Image (spheres, rainbow, N blue to C red):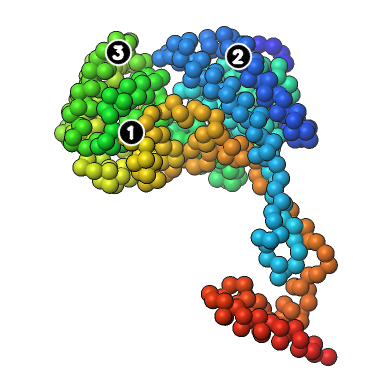
Amino acid sequence: MPSSILMPSSIAQVIEVARQAQRQWQKQMPKVRQRAIRQVAGLLAEEYASLLPLIPRPNASAADKIASEVFPLAEACRFTAAVSRRTLAPQTYSMREGAWWIGRVRVTVSAEPWGIVLIVAPGNYPLFLPGVQAIQALAAGNAVLIKPAPGCQPLLARFKELLIAAGVPTDLVHILPEEIAAGREAMQLGVDKVVATGSAATGQAILHDLATTLTPATLELSGCDAIFVLPQAQIEQVVPALIYALKLNGGATCIAPRRIFVTPAHRAELAQALDEGLSDAGEPDAVVPPSVLEHALQVVGAALSEGAEIVHGKLPAKPAAGKMRPLVLQSVTAKMAIARTDLFAPIVSIIEVPDMQTALAADRHCPYGLGAAIFGPRSLAEHWANEVNAGCVVINDAVVPTADPRVPFGGWGKSGWGLTRGREGLREMARTKTTCTRLGNWKPHLDRSISGNEVLMSSLLAVFHASSWRKRFQAMGRVLSQIRRPSPP
């Protein structure tokens, strides 16, 4: 590893060095930051081969890593460079929208960098997810600290090398040790914003650490995503998308399908098609961490004891080996734990419902609201999308469209809050500053003949807000009478 990316000897030093670098970076013209971000995309295209061996994803081929890690990160760099200047530009609001009775005031809203943004990175997509967050934080003028997931420090160190080669100052980005203690120490010492991706339990632990300093956070947490199959859906279009999303990254995708709501007319056909499609796949077992697999099998066992049935797959004979085939259950109800748990393995449950209204009501038993998908005629699907309790809804596909750089991504409920990616995610990397500039010398609040006149003030209120024009004209008469009235000596 080149010495240029070695971090200082302590977290406290890291923060001090980063803060000094951030002050200079903030002063750079936006086009300088844009140029650096744009060049990162080119370096990703040219140097991707040096990244792939460092991505610790046992369920992903080289092509999978390019498609799900490098390509979407490069697209996010291109998008961020293109939109950051306009997205973060100061806005001055129209005087016509203001309150004239307090005098002429120009209101300008600007986006100021937080300062130091700590990114707590996940292990399932260890380059794409923290990479986009880092790019957007840098574009907004921040310094960045990244706490890698276990086994991911070499990957993110190489990513930092690409950032430096693109023109990002060496001291502006720091890769912390992988240990949880490193992230906690950074929070305690004083970062300005935390962006974390992980489980709901991880989010709760982070918030506990941030409570004493009231440090703001964006949290992208667990999912238990619902798939709604409308009665008008074509099953032959639904099943390939479901199989792809279920198997993606060995089931370790936060917005992988976990619950499929389907009507009786389609339930048997869907179950058979999933069984046949997964049987024909002919792929090796997914690698699942033993602790994750053990928890998942406990939840599956509870569901089976409550009446659920296995449609496809079987329970692994040796969970400690950390491998399993995709598992499809049916006869699951929305109140079972398996329909309310954030599993991280290739497991999906079919839940039969009489209609979409019932499906939506059943979906609300789940505390997670990260993503969802609806299959059916586009007009109907778009109608029902407005009723779904999730931060991101995909229509007639699953998972993949969310990698579009335009898509802001974030959850509801126990899936966290705040947004990453898209224009909205970029905007969250800055805090709002409002500047109110007094124009002219008229300051009616300083004139007691105006601000202390109850009749005048109540009449002005009616002029602008009374429920009928008649009442407004009557109030105008009272205003004129007050203005014409001689001031007391």
Give the quadrant of the N terminus.
top right
Residue name at image x 23 percent, y 22 percent: 273
The span from disc 1 to disc 3 (Cα, nearest Å) is 22 Å
The span from disc 2 to disc 3 (Cα, nearest Å) is 31 Å
Give the quadrant of the C terminus.
bottom right
Q: Which mark is residue 52?
A: none
Looking at the image, can residue 193 be seen? no
Seen in the image, is 36 located left or right of residue 118?
A: right
Residue name at image x 34 percent, y 30 percent: 257
Residue name at image x 75 percent, y 30 percent: 31
Q: Amino acid at mark 1?
A: Phe
Residue 57 on image: x %, y %: 45, 15
What residue is shown with label 1? 375
Which quadrant of the figure has residue 378? top left
Which quadrant of the figure has residue 186? top right
Residue 278 on image: x %, y %: 27, 17
Q: Amino acid at mark 2?
A: Ala
Question: Badge 1: few (under 14), some or many (20 or more) residues near its Cα, within 10 Å?
Answer: many
Disc nearest the viewer among 1 and 3: 1
Q: Which element carries disc 2, helix, strand or loop? A: helix
What residue is shown with label 2? 45
